[in-house]
Amino acid sequence: MNVRRSAAALAAVGVLAAAAPATAADPSPSPKVTVPSGLYGKGDPTYDGVWRQSLTLLAQRTLGYRPAAAAVDWLTGQQCADGAFAAFRAEPAGPCDDKVKADTNSTAAAVQALAATGGHGGAVDKAVGWLKSVQNKDGGWGYYPGGPSDTNSTSVVIGALTAAGTDPADVRKSGKSPYDALPTWSIPCGKDGGGALAYQPDKKGKLLPNADATAAGVLGALGKGFVAEAGKAPAQDACAEAEHLTPAQVADNAGAYLGTAVAKTGHLESTLPGAKDQPDFGNTADAVVALAADGRTEPAKKAYAWLEKNAGQWAAQSGPAAYAQLIFAAHAIGEQPGDFNGTSLVSSLNALGPAPHMDSAAHESAAEDEDSGTSVWWIIGVGLVGGIGIGFLLSGRKKRQS
């Protein structure tokens, strides 16, 4: 449950929503909409076209690849005149009218991808300008403009701002920044689920712990995007009480919650309302990145080890966003995505669309590593590393957009 598919849906109905790229499912082998040339994946792109393309391009850049021009052109061609992105525009040459619902998550993901690929400063600036224009008075963002703010949307926008070279703390509405919004969704330590973040308050104003939102919130509070590396170990493992939580405290408390959540089994359970108890591969991958970014490498590695043993089939069925999430997880803890329990996440992802090219500086070494079943990590720079997620962000994109 981690491709933003599920989360989106849930958010729309005001339910808990998954917030992270949650289920990453490449919906169906027989899409109702023709899959355009240049787009990764064979599933119907109606609800996740921009999302899965953005994560794919970002994953490729993280690995040291230069995405195919056709793939990048497809993404830039999805941008509306005002700078926003919708989940998918079947007729990109047409105007973005009332039938095209631009959303913050698709826009923020595209920003991170285009900032990483380079050479698209104009598109990035327009998208960031649009995101700033739809910020809510509490400092956060909702999935759709005008909708109530939520942890996942706010966090993925923070990642976009960072990727674009903008300090999220300086982006304010009515005097409030996204770092003022995140603490309002953090559950107090003494309550059930203390330290976790809620997607947003329920109808009664109660905060309910949501692992998907919690993973997204860790990265958001740390000012990071989908791609992150291991951070400094937190000052304490337990939840810290404070009348006014700082972003670092929000991240550490949420990290402590996630660490406990994966301690026993190595994975997170599905957060979709009414779902049976079952592992959530996408959210677990997001949790690996969040835990590593917060300096909790031991639980991050445990969760990744579980993914290595169990997530192969999920990724194969789900498509490009799922492979990208696993690549982000591997990157966060320094593992090799070229050897994921005998499978190359790198080759599997690249085979789903236009073939990328290895940057010349890394080509020879990467070829050697691929031959040996591993893959080289190429350091792209602050802009890329800063670039979130959470992505992770959402898990029920399709439901959320209904």
Image (cartoon, helix red, strand yellow):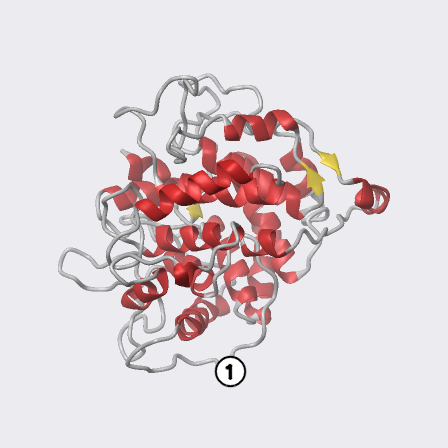
Q: In the picture shown, does residue 139 fall above or below 109? A: below
View extreme (left): residue:
204
Looking at the picture, does residue 263 appear above or below residue 363? Answer: below
Label 1 environment density (alpha carbons within 10 Å; few <14, some 14–19, many ≥20): few
Q: Is residue 318 visible?
A: no
Check the image and report above or below for 262 versus 276.
below
Task: Name the residue that disc number 1 marks.
Answer: 235
Residue at image location 59% in from the left, 53% down from the top: 383
Q: Position of residue 216 (x, y in %)?
A: 42, 57
At 43% from the left edge and 65% from the top edge, which residue is drawn? 221
Residue 382 shows in the view: yes
Percent x, y for residue 114? 55, 40
Q: Residue 365 appears at what percent x and percent y?
A: 84, 47
Please tell me which residue is depicted at 27% across the width and 33% down the height of the picture.
402
Does residue 270 lie above or below 100 as drawn?
A: below
Q: Which of the two residues, 337 or 82, is positioned nearer the viewer here?
A: 82
Question: Total of numbered circles in the picture?
Answer: 1
> Which element is circle 1 on?
loop
**Does 95 sit left or right of 78 as displayed?**
left
Residue 401 image position (x, y, % from top left) = 30, 35
Q: Residue at x 46, y 52 (%)?
A: 161
Q: Which residue is at the front of the view, 222 or 320?
A: 222
Image quadrant in which you'd find residue 364: top right
Of residues 126 and 20, the one nearer the viewer is 126
Residue type, mark 1 in image: Ala
